Image (cartoon, coloured by chain):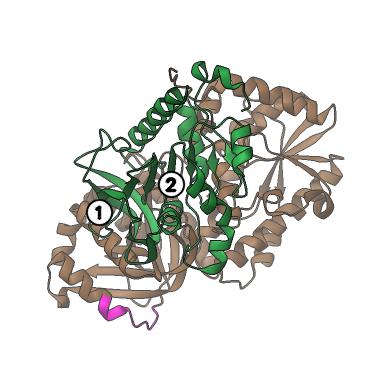
Chain colours: A green, B brown
Amino acid sequence: MKHNDSLVAVLKPVVPVVNVKGQYNHLIVRMLTELGAESSLVPLSISMDELEEIGFNGVVAGGGPQSVYEKNSRRELGNLERLLKEISKPVLCICVSHQLLAEALGGRTGPAKKPEYGRITVHVDEEDEILRGTGPSFTAWASHNDEVIRMPDRFERLARSQRCKVEAMRSRNKPIYGIQFHPEVWHTTKGRTIFRNLIEIVERNAASRG
Amino acid sequence: MTVQRSEFDAEAFVKSQIDEIAQRLHGERAIIAISGGVDSTTCAALAHKAVGKNLLCIFIDTGFMRLDEPRKVKALLSKRHLALPIRIVGAQKRFMEAIGQNEDAEEKRKAFRETFYKTLSETAKKEDSRFLIQGTIAPDWIETKGGIKTQHNVLEQIGINAQERYGFTIIEPIANLYKDQVRAVARYMDIPREISERQPFPGPGLLVRCIGRVEPSKLKTLKQSTQIVEKLLATTGGQQFFAAVLDNATADHPAKEPLQKQVSEFLKIQSTEVKVNILQNKATGVKGDVRVYGRIASVSISKEKREVYGWLIEKLRELQFRLTSGNPEFTRILYTIKEGKESDPYDVAIRAIETRDFMTADIVAIPWAILTATAKEILKKCSNIAHVYYDLTSKPPATIEFE
């Protein structure tokens, strides 16, 4: 995945996937690769320097079995939490990473009053960039015991479902997005659109950095 | 920066894997465990192209195969076009003994895996082969590593050293592929359609569909029901469709009344017309990436109303979603199609799913007329069944197989 910075403009966008140990992490890599990005799974312990070294243009953090308000889980995810605070390039956080993102930037995650396993309908409030072309609603697959209870300051909600208030959110300050459902699985009807949007965001961001 | 789509390239994959297998074996002999499914057959075809007669395909008859399967598979793979060298190793008794009285899904799977590798290991020694090739694919190791299920063919990814324990080195040429990609490779290699498009069959075979304790009469009922379901549901469009057999035994459980109420409220029918049972058998599920060895609930609606909802599959899907999402212990919801004799020992569940990669799955909306015809046929052929159900559960919260 390593390449010379000066060649970035003509190469595929490099979007590694942080493996948070969920079952679908591998599918994120598959999706990104099929859409023309360069991607592979990288470990939870990956540092900012290592990400820079592989020449990343953006990053996706996947789902996992952890509960981010539990001590051991939080320790396991400590490195990713630091990265989420630090990275200024585009980041998409899915499921547990979305919940971690909320906690990392001052919001709150807790047990879901109404968990969701399987088919849900996502209602799009704001097509924004990451959800462009997905409104007003679409079928998605979700699987979560926890949920974001309060978004961090300067975040806005992009989507919700009947049972879950924050299905998608973004920061107003930087291109960092959280999604509760699983856009990487085949049963999520607009999943491909979302990843296509992500790649566009990554490309625009890379171009603006020169 | 322009994005180019880079779909999976079967041709490039085949070329690189044939080279790699040849290099790794370096003129030595290898065995491959085959089941007649698309994964192991594709792997065997790749390995055969790479090393020719240095490959021997082993078909272990575990006793948990479908009716007449060993013979059929051998005939299919020996055909001139594939010409794979095959040996059938009979091990039914050995597997039955190893499973014994185990009721727990994971214990059964582990006993199966251990027996499977011991049998292979002995065969490898006899054949003087240090290498075992296997058709492990991505969901196999993802689920095992994630602690959802013990797959029969996953060792190294969870830290079991096959060399030390069984005396062979494992080669897994298609470990990073998903099912649809394996099928693309199979088609590219001209593997007969009967195999390339064949619905998946689990590694431990019918063991994982014989829920709870294995008994000879239960297994026999399962084999007969499997044959009926595979025949009658073949044109309904699912990627996988099968039967599972359960014990006709219910558990006393505090969720029974609440569930009954939830069903009658959601379907807007009187509570006297709804009966919910919590079964004694449990089933593997996955909720929020965590394995749940969960409860199974059956929903029976009065005969007059049953058919109405049987046609309203969207409604039943939503019912399943509500019941499993609202009740953390539950990972399966079954809908009663037909009853046999209440005193009979077993139940049969029909499951049909649509999926691309088997990582997520939705149930197939099978016309009620086909479901009832299938149930009728099962009740006719098997004399020991109390209920025939349709499994309403998506993945998540269920897994594709029951155990």
Q: Is residue A7 left or right of residue B5?
A: right
Q: In percent of the image, x 63 and y 27: which residue is there?
A: A2
Return the disc, 2 or 1, that comes first in the chain's sequence.
2
Q: Residues within 10 Å of mark 2 (few under 14, many from 20)?
A: many
Q: In percent of the image, x 50 and y 66: which residue is there?
A: B218
Disc 2 residue type?
A: Cys
Disc 1 residue type?
A: Ser
Of B46 and A49, nearer the camera is: A49
Residue B286 lies, in percent from the top left, at: 46, 59
Of A180 and A58, nearer the camera is: A58
Residue A97 lies, in percent from the top left, at: 46, 52
Q: Residue B148 — which label?
A: none
- Labels 2 and 1 positioned on one and the same chain: yes
Q: Secondary structure at mark 2?
A: strand
The magenta-colored residue range is: B250-258
Q: Which residue is mark 1?
A: A161
Please name which of the two marks, 2 or 1, marks the residue nearer to the observer.
Answer: 2
Q: Which residue is mark 2?
A: A93
Of B381 and B95, nearer the camera is: B95
Is residue A172 magenta-colored?
A: no
